[in-house]
């Protein structure tokens, strides 16, 4: 069902679901207006909040951007904390996420961010409660995938757009991939475009392959070391085709196994039985800790933001934090 919907969303289908999309849009619009009018109350954290989100369901590059921001702010002497819904996890109450936390409980992306950034990370169905858990030990809070979580007041909004797929058929859920209309972008502070071509006023971002990291030993190898080799490749992310395209561009002969975003991964999922190496994303790797997988690697990628827009983005965030 999900695969069929995505084909419709990023093709020309979905028209038959237009009545449901209209209902969804009306409810979402009323909710958004209620917050703007003060009928529903947004709550402020004790530290400035920067929201990183998108308009579409699925992956667009939010998590790599959050990791990039945490590093850039750290280089300027600021300690960022990170809050998330924890999609794919079971906890709903405010929970601190450690690098060795169970992704089945707290979600795969929060564990990835805790490992990658070393920043305080908290998850909760209520992002306000998550921010309360860590606000006393940070200078500001980065909310991963929080654009539509209006209960958490924010000082700055960043929308991430998939530069290849953009907004698909342009319809709202369930007729299309949009959680909010494209016009919502006029109200955010910055638009970051992952891949594809950034338009005027948008900030271009690329995900650059850094190295393959062995799942067990941590040994690092260049992606080029697998050029011309047959491998199995799995990706339980919002847009698996992007990962597979990266492997093809490096000359890797990958047998592709796309999985639903945040899908659980166990030894049975990966029992291909032919002894070929296994490559996966970093987001998948956090769910494979402790599995005996033989020759298995995850691909480390780094977000790269280009031009004056990237500098202005970081400076705007730095300016939110009061200095003594």
Image (cartoon, rainbow, N blue to C red):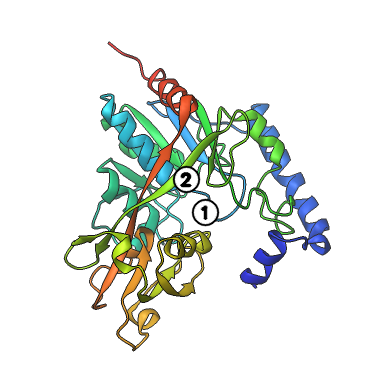
In the image, 189 versus 127, the foreground residue is 189
Mark 2 lies on a secondary structure that is helix
Image: 40 above or below 260: above
Q: Is residue 138 left or right of residue 256?
A: left
Q: Residue at x 45, y 33 (%)?
A: 306
- Is residue 132 in sight in this rendering? no
Q: Residue 145's spot in the image, x, y percent?
A: 50, 45
Q: How many marks?
A: 2
- Is residue 216 in sight in this rendering? yes
Q: On the image, numbered disc 1 is attached to which residue?
A: 59
Mark 1 lies on a secondary structure that is loop
Q: Residue 93's spot in the image, x, y percent?
A: 39, 51
Q: Residue at x 46, y 44 (%)?
A: 206
Q: Residue 92's spot in the image, x, y percent?
A: 43, 54
Q: Which mark is residue 62?
A: 2
Image: 231 above or below 85: below
In the image, 99 versus 47, the foreground residue is 99
In the image, 258 versus 137, the foreground residue is 258
Q: Residue 271's spot in the image, x, y percent?
A: 35, 84
Q: Which mark is residue 117?
A: none
Q: Residue at x 28, y 31 (%)?
A: 74
Q: CA distance from mark 1 to mark 2?
A: 7 Å
Q: Quadrant of the C terminus?
A: top left
Residue furthest to the top in view is 324
Asked if the residue at tag 2 contacts the one at tag 1, i.e. Cβ–Cβ closer than 8 Å, the answer is yes
Graded by Cα atoms within 10 Å as few (under 14), some (14 to 19) or many (20 or more), the crowding at tag 2 reads many
């Amino acid at each position: 069902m999900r695969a069929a919907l995505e084909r419709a969303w990023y093709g020309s289908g979905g028209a038959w679901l237009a009545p449901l999309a209209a209902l969804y849009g009306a409810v979402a619009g009323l909710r958004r207006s209620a917050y703007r009018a003060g009928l529903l109350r947004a709550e402020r954290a004790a530290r400035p909040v920067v929201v990183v989100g998108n308009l579409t369901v699925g992956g667009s590059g939010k998590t790599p951007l959050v990791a990039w921001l945490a590093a850039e702010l750290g280089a300027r002497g600021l300690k960022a904390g990170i809050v998330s819904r924890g999609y794919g996890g079971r906890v709903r109450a405010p929970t601190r996420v450690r690098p060795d936390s169970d992704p089945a409980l707290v979600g795969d992306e929060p564990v990835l961010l805790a490992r990658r950034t070393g920043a305080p990370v908290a998850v909760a169905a209520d992002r306000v409660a998550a921010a309360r858990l860590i606000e006393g030990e940070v200078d500001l809070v980065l909310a991963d995938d929080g654009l539509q979580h209006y209960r958490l007041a924010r000082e700055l909004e960043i929308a991430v757009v998939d530069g290849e797929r953009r907004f698909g058929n342009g319809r709202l859920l369930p007729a299309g991939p949009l959680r909010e209309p494209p016009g919502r972008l006029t109200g955010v502070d910055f638009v970051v475009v992952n891949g594809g071509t950034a338009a005027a006023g948008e900030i271009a971002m690329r995900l650059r392959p850094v190295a393959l990291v062995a799942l067990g030993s941590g040994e690092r190898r260049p992606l080029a070391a697998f050029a011309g080799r047959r491998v199995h490749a799995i990706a339980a992310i919002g847009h698996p085709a992007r990962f597979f395209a990266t492997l093809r561009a490096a000359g890797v002969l990958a047998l592709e196994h796309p999985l639903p975003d945040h899908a659980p991964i166990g030894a049975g999922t990966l029992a291909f039985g032919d002894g070929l190496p296994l490559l996966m994303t970093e987001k998948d790797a956090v769910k494979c800790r402790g599995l005996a997988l033989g020759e298995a690697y995850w691909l480390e990628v780094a977000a790269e933001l280009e031009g004056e827009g990237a500098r202005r983005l970081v400076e705007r965030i730095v300016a939110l934090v009061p200095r003594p």
